[in-house]
């Protein structure tokens, strides 16, 4: 027996050392690939980042948005952590029979707890198998690789329970309630001799050991690399969701013009943090499941974007570094990424591939509405939108490729400051639609030697679009009623630059931002309020990178404050059933969900009902990312799909706090031929109806 245990010890140490060597090799290889990327800036904020890790990683907050899958993952996540103590106990029993973890009188309770946890994990494995292969959730991949981890985990749990049962027979231990499953196994095999039980114990022990070590090696070279990468990714994720990185256009004179490129044209142009995103991807499909483009038949799948970039980085990393992506390498001799030399034909092929075109198509990139629903759903905080826009930047600024409709809108913004190309001189004419509203320009107030508290950024929609003008007028009249001092830029107001930046024309955006900031500084702007969530987001979160900071408000935030302060009183009854659509740039980008709803709740007679997809999971209207200015030619229209979701709750009014969303939803009701029965209105318009109802009656 002593000789056997010595051999067992030696074999265990050799196998374990080899497994840890392979694990370390895979991890260091992936780190080498990630180091090919550009260094990422780190802003500190350690406490905030640790809180995020605690909430998302250990609290499983994002996973639990899907209650069933979230529960399965919680069972596996915490079960697997807790069961590691059982694994250590199992190793001790195999290496030193008759011994176990030194828990003294608490050991029987430990054994009972471990069996409960093991059973919980087995239930989770069976449930996960059912969800993937029986229920066949669309977002989940099927196949051998997708289920391999379930085989690993199931084998680990069953080998522990069976091995402990055989150990009881071998050592002649009595059946006990503290080890119910092992006792059942021992009872079922009670006819075995002690020697046979010993042999079966060590078979189970080695199955458990080899499975665990194989799993260790498998994890970093599979989608389960998220076990390592996800906590790091969550810790490093952006403090401000959806914020885009600034491009420095200051070039050195020594730079070769042919080598100059903007955006991401090669995988190594991504930042190292973005590359961690690729390896953190769980392939769970939650992002694609909520993507408005994917859901309406477009080519885009945020998950596939991450997977294709990950695989390309792995292949190119192997080619550039000469380090095989897979271990043990002899087991993957024919696999992509097993390029041991940067000089081989396969390596040359990988290095010559165009990232935009060969790996990711322009059609995929152009379908993104930048709504961030994918990022909100992602359990590991992957930032898909920034990655897509970096690729768009290369497509637009380096290759000069752009959809013709968007190109026309961008040219109009560049020349006239609005997407339609209408005259700059007409920008202020919207005021003439209602002469009862007092809407001064900054120049007019300056002539009168008066000051203003808020700059009202009207936006191109509010200034030129006839439907959106009504929103701007309603909001202006409400500010008049509340005694708010405000002014508009008038004809010198331009475009916020959001469209240019989101479609990938960073150079134009920076030109626009520089001009806007000069106007803001000229008139000493300290507070901005706007009806446009896109302008709200870019002024609040992205203009500070260019030296301008101010208090920025969405009009629903200001209106809610005015109601709370008693400066506006909704008194007129509006007996309607209303559902509210969340603007992506107001909600997911900035977390503003309650103010518009509280305004609507304050209006007498109004019944507010929520769509199935609302707030954080609200579906995009389809206008973001510059797509307001294009026609959808593939699949179903996103705005119609969103309108159908609104119609499911049988509203008489569909409301929103964004002129782009309102346009898309209005078009949606027309497409569904319900526009005569269902109104589409901005929150400000509905509030104005209630606030001014008596005045309108008196006027009549």
Image: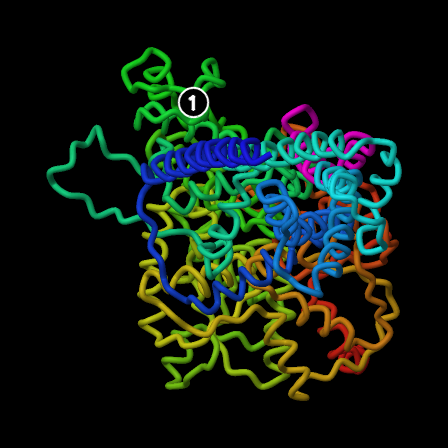
Secondary structure under tag 1 reads loop
Magenta includes 255? no
- Which percent across, then down, holds residue 325? 42, 27
- In this rendering, the answer to whether 304 lies above or below 357 is below
Residue at (73% x, 31% y) in the render: 195
Residue at (69% x, 47% y) in the render: 76
Q: Quadrant of residue 218 in the image?
A: top right
In the rendered image, the residue lying farthest to the left is 254
Q: Nearer the viewer, residue 206 or 353?
A: 206
Q: Nearer the viewer, residue 164 or 387?
A: 164
Magenta includes 132? yes
- Which percent across, then down, holds residue 420? 50, 45
Q: Which residues are magenta?
A: 129-158
- Which percent across, then down, holds residue 424? 42, 55
- Which percent across, then down, holds residue 614? 73, 56
Residue at (57% x, 31% y) in the render: 4
Dividing the image into 4 quarters, which one contains the C terminus? bottom right
């Amino acid at each position: 027996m002593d000789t056997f245990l010595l051999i067992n010890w030696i074999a265990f140490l050799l196998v374990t050392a080899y497994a840890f060597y392979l694990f370390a090799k895979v991890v260091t290889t992936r780190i080498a690939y990630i180091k090919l990327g550009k260094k990422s800036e780190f802003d500190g904020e350690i406490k905030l980042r640790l809180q995020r890790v605690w909430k998302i990683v250990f609290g499983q907050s994002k996973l639990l948005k899907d209650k069933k899958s979230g529960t399965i993952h919680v069972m596996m996540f915490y079960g697997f952590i807790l069961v590691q103590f059982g694994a250590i106990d199992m190793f001790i029993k195999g290496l030193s029979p008759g011994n176990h973890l030194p828990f003294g009188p608490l050991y029987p309770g430990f054994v009972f707890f471990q069996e409960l946890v093991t059973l919980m994990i087995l239930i989770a494995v069976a449930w996960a198998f059912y969800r993937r292969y029986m229920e066949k959730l669309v977002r989940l991949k099927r196949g051998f690789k997708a289920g391999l981890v379930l085989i690993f985990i199931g084998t680990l749990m069953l080998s522990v329970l069976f091995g402990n049962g055989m150990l009881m027979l071998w050592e002649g231990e009595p059946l006990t309630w503290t080890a119910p499953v092992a006792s059942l196994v021992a009872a079922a095999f009670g006819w075995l001799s002690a020697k046979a039980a010993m042999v079966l114990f060590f078979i189970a022990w080695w199955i458990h050991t080899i499975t665990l070590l194989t799993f260790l090696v498998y994890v970093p070279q599979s989608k389960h690399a998220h076990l390592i990468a996800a906590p790091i990714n969550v810790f490093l994720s952006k403090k401000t969701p959806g914020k885009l990185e600034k491009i420095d256009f200051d070039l050195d004179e020594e730079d070769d013009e042919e080598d100059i490129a903007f955006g991401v044209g090669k995988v190594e142009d991504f930042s190292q943090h973005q590359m961690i995103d690729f390896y953190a991807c769980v392939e769970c499909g939650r992002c694609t499941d909520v993507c408005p483009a994917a859901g309406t038949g477009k080519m885009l799948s945020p998950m596939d974007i991450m997977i294709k970039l990950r695989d390309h980085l792995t292949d190119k990393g192997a080619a550039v570094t000469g380090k095989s992506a897979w271990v043990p390498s002899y087991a993957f001799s024919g696999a992509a990424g097993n390029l041991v030399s940067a000089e081989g034909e396969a390596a040359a092929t990988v290095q010559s591939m165009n990232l935009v075109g060969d790996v990711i198509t322009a059609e995929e990139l152009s379908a993104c509405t930048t709504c961030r629903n994918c990022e909100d759903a992602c359990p590991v905080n992957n930032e898909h939108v920034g990655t897509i826009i970096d690729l768009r930047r290369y497509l637009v600024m380096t290759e000069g490729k752009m959809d013709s409709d968007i190109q026309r809108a961008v040219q109009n913004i560049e020349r006239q400051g609005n997407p339609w190309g209408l005259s700059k001189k007409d920008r202020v004419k919207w005021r003439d639609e209602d002469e009862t509203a007092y809407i001064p320009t900054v120049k007019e107030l300056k002539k009168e030697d008066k000051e203003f508290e808020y700059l009202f950024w009207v936006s191109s929609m509010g200034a030129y679009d006839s439907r959106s003008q009504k929103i701007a007028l309603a909001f202006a009249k409400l500010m008049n009623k509340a005694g708010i001092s405000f002014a508009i830029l008038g004809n010198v107001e331009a475009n916020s630059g959001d469209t240019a930046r989101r479609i990938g024309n960073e150079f134009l955006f920076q030109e626009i931002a520089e001009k806007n900031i000069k106007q803001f500084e000229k008139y000493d702007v300290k507070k901005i309020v706007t009806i446009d969530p896109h302008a709200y987001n870019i002024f609040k979160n992205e203009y500070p990178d260019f030296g301008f900071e101010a208090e920025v408000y969405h009009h629903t935030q200001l209106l809610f404050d005015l109601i709370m302060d008693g400066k506006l009183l909704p008194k007129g009854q509006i007996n309607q059933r209303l559902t509210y659509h969340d603007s992506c740039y107001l909600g997911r980008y900035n977390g503003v969900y309650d103010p518009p709803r509280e305004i609507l709740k304050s209006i007498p007679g109004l019944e507010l009902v929520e769509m199935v997809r609302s707030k954080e999971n609200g579906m995009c209207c389809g206008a973001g990312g510059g797509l307001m200015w294009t026609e959808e030619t593939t699949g179903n229209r996103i705005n119609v799909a969103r309108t159908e979701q609104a119609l499911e709750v049988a509203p008489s009014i569909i409301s929103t706090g964004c002129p782009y969303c309102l346009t898309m939803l209005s078009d949606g009701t027309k497409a569904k031929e319900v526009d005569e029965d269902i109104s589409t209105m901005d929150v400000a318009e509905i509030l104005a109806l209630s606030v001014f109802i008596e005045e309108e009656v008196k006027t009549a």
